[in-house]
Amino acid sequence: MPKVLISDDLSPRATEIFEERGIEVDRKVGMKPEELLACIDAYDGLAIRSATKATREVLAAASNLKVIGRAGIGVDNVDVDAATEAGVVVMNTPFGNAVTTAEHAIAMICALAREIPMANASTQAGKWEKSRFMGTEITGKRLGLIGCGNIGSIVADRACGLKMRVSAYDPYLSDERAVDLGVRKVDLDTLLEEADFISLHTPLTDATRDILDAEALAKTKGFLMINLDVRATQTRAIQSFEARGFSRYAVNEHYARVDDAYVTGYYFHKELK
């Protein structure tokens, strides 16, 4: 009987699905790397999310492993080259949370355009500053998408429904697909110069790492909300945002370790002039 290890916190339904198909399942969440190394050789499959790191060392110890299933979009916590060399298939779920992620980006755009996080903090502090938090409408504003694939295209669809004008920078976006989505295909410099809002939806690769650096930031306009993965942004660029009067809001400190901080994203906002 095939044997699968679930080493991250998946839904109990995942265990049921495996067992319904005659697969033996062990659920060991929160193991230390050395504990994973000690037991991985006993399994044919490994089911993970973001916490487990399937490193070259782990794959070398997994002589019976045939497949790694990542419940999520990215596979940057798996050494894909080492897996290929070992004959281990790496699978992900590229559409699993695409709608959720896209809707979250739209929610952040709306929240920051209307200054909801800032107004909430003010109210929680016992203030009532109605005139301070006027916000701005998103109707007619220009949304710039860096990446217009599975998630970015859904963001574009939702933004068009909100009467935003959408531009997209994506080397893999065809002219025909851009027309179908109702977006304007542009180069990166043009997007940076004209966007009121920017949302980044790219995989982390050598081509996208640090795509928003200090030089890119200098090209942006006065009002801007940026939804981004910190791994694709230079730390000095993030500091430059703040130096230019942007405020940082809604930082989630859970997953990716970058510059000695666990962060997944930043949201920046500056008052419309």
Image (cartoon, helix red, strand yellow):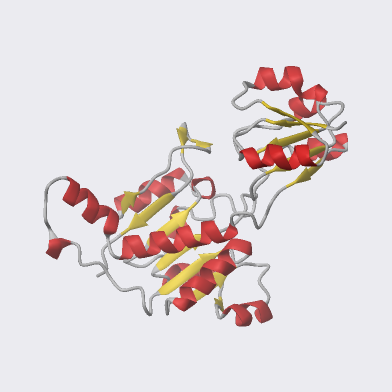
49 w.r.t. 119: above or below: above
Image location of residue 38, percent across then percent down: 74, 17
Nearest the camera: 11 or 232? Answer: 11
Image location of residue 33, percent across then percent down: 65, 22
Image location of residue 204, percent across then percent down: 61, 49
38 w.r.t. 160: above or below: above
Quadrant into which the C terminus falls? bottom left
Q: Is residue 18 left or right of residue 72?
A: right
Q: Residue at x 41, y 66 (%)?
A: 197
Q: Number of numbered discs present?
A: 0
Q: Is residue 146 left or right of residue 77?
A: left
Q: Residue at x 25, y 67 (%)?
A: 135
Image location of residue 84, percent across then percent down: 84, 40
Nearest the camera: 195 or 43? Answer: 43
Quadrant into which the N terminus falls? top right
Kindly tell me whether residue 257 is visible in this rendering.
yes
Q: Residue at x 42, y 43 (%)?
A: 252
Nearest the camera: 178 or 241? Answer: 178
Q: Residue at x 48, y 62 (%)?
A: 103
Q: Is residue 104 left or right of residue 170?
A: left
Nearest the camera: 98 or 259? Answer: 98
181 w.r.t. 25: above or below: below
Residue occupying the far front of the picture: 20
Where, by quadrant of the figure, is residue 227 drawn?
A: bottom left
Kindly tell me whether residue 49 is visible in this rendering.
no
